[in-house]
Image: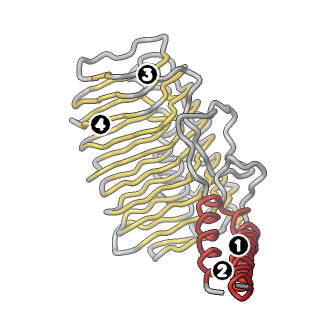
Amino acid sequence: MERDLLFKKIHEFYQILKYFLSLIMTSILSMVFFVSVSFTNRPDNYSGVHLRTSCVSEKIVQGRSYNYCNIDINDCHFSRSAKYNGGNGGVIYVNGGSFSMSISSSSFICCSCSERGGAVYFSSSSSVLNMLCACNCSASCEHFCYVCTPQNFVEYVSFAFCSPDYVGYFPIQLYQGTQRVRQINSSLNNANSISGLYIACPQSFTCSYSLLNNNSASDNTCLDFAYQSGVMSFTNIINNKSPSLGIVRIEMGASYQMQYCVFYSNQNTLFCVHSGSLEISHSFISHSGTISTSTSVLTVINNSFTSHKAYDIQFFNSVFCGHKHTILSPTNYRELTSYNTLYFVFRFVGTILSLSF
C-alpha cells in the first residue's frame, strides 16, 4: 500500500514537473522570437516600428540600382534627390526575360523617373512584395510601382503622398497574371487618373484587409478595375475624392465583387460602371452623394452593421508610412499578428518537448 502511494506521488510530481518545463520552454522560445523577429516584422498596430537598414542605404542623386537581373532585396532603404530621366523604373527596371523579384522590409523614399514606375518597373516571371514603404514617389505613370507577372503577391505594402502635384496617372498598377493582394495601405496619394489602386487584366484577383484613404484624383477615380474579374473584401474605402467617374470604377467588361467593405465619407459619385458589373454585399455604405450612375451596380444585404464597426486592419508601420486618419477601430474582425501566431506555434513545440522528459 505504501509503495503504491509512493508511486502515485512520484507520478503526480512528474506531471507537475512536465507542466512547469512546458511553461519555461514556451517562455524561452517566445522571448527568442520576440527579440529576433518582432521588431522588424510586426504589423503597424504596434507603434514605433522602424525599418532596419542592414544593407547600405542608397541616398544618391538619381539612377537605377537594379537592371535586368533576378532581384532579392531585404532591409534596404532607397532615396533619390533628383528624377531619373532615362525612362522607366527609377530604382528597379526589368522588362522581359525570366527574372524573379522579391522585395521585403524595405523603403522607397522620393524615388522618381520620367516615364513609368517611379521606384519599380518590373515585367517578367514572378514577384513578391512584402512589408514595403513608399513615400513621395512620382512618375508620369505608376508613381511608385508597375508589376506585370504571371504570379504576383503583395502584402503589407504602404504607399503614401505619391505625386503630390497631381502629375501622373496612378500610384500603382498590377497588370495581368494571378494577383494576390493583402493588407495594403494606399493613403494621401494624388493622381490625374486613378489615385488609389489600378488593377488591369488579371487572370485572377483577390484583395483583402486593406485601406484606401484620403486619395484624390483630379480627373477620374480612386479604385479602378479593368477587364476580367475578381473579389475585394474587408477593405476600408474612406475620405477619397473623385470628381466625375466614381470612387470605384468598373470598365472594359470587368466583373467584380466587393464584400464586407466600409465605404465612408467619400466625395461625389461612389460607384461607376462603364461596362461590366459590380456587386456590393455585406458592406457598410455611408455616402451623401450619388451612390451609382448605373443599373449594373448591385447592392445587396448592406448596412447590416453600424458605422462604428470598421474592420481592424493591421499595417506595416515605419517612420514614413503611418497614415494620418485612425478610423481603423475594432471590430468584426481581429487577425492574429505574426507574433501571436508564432507564439502559439512555440507554445505547442514547448509542450511537445516537455512531454519527452
* Residue mark closest to the camera, 4 vs 3: 3
Task: Residue type at mark 1: give it.
Answer: Tyr
Residue ID for mark 2 = 354
Residue sitting at 73 percent across and 62 percent down? 39
Task: Kindly report the distance in space between the C-alpha atoms of the residues bearing marks 2 and 1.
Answer: 7 Å
Residue ID for mark 3 = 304
Is residue 45 toward the left or the right of residue 94 in the image?
right
- Give the mark nearer the N terminus: 4 vs 3: 4
* Residue mark closest to the camera, 1 vs 4: 1
Residue sitting at 59 percent across and 48 percent down? 158
Counting other residues with Cα less than 10 Å from the Cα at mark 4, is it few (<14), some (14-19), or many (20 or more)?
A: many
Foreground residue, 194 or 157? 157
Task: Residue type at mark 2: give it.
Answer: Ser
Residue sitting at 58 percent across and 34 percent down? 331
- Give the mark nearer the N terminus: 2 vs 3: 3
Q: Is residue 56 visible?
A: no
Q: Are marks 2 and 1 in contact (CB under 8 Å)?
A: yes
Task: Kindly report the distance in space between the C-alpha atoms of the residues bearing marks 1 and 4.
Answer: 52 Å
Counting other residues with Cα less than 10 Å from the Cα at mark 3, is it few (<14), some (14-19), or many (20 or more)?
A: few
Residue 64 lies, with reference to residue 177, above or below; the image says: below
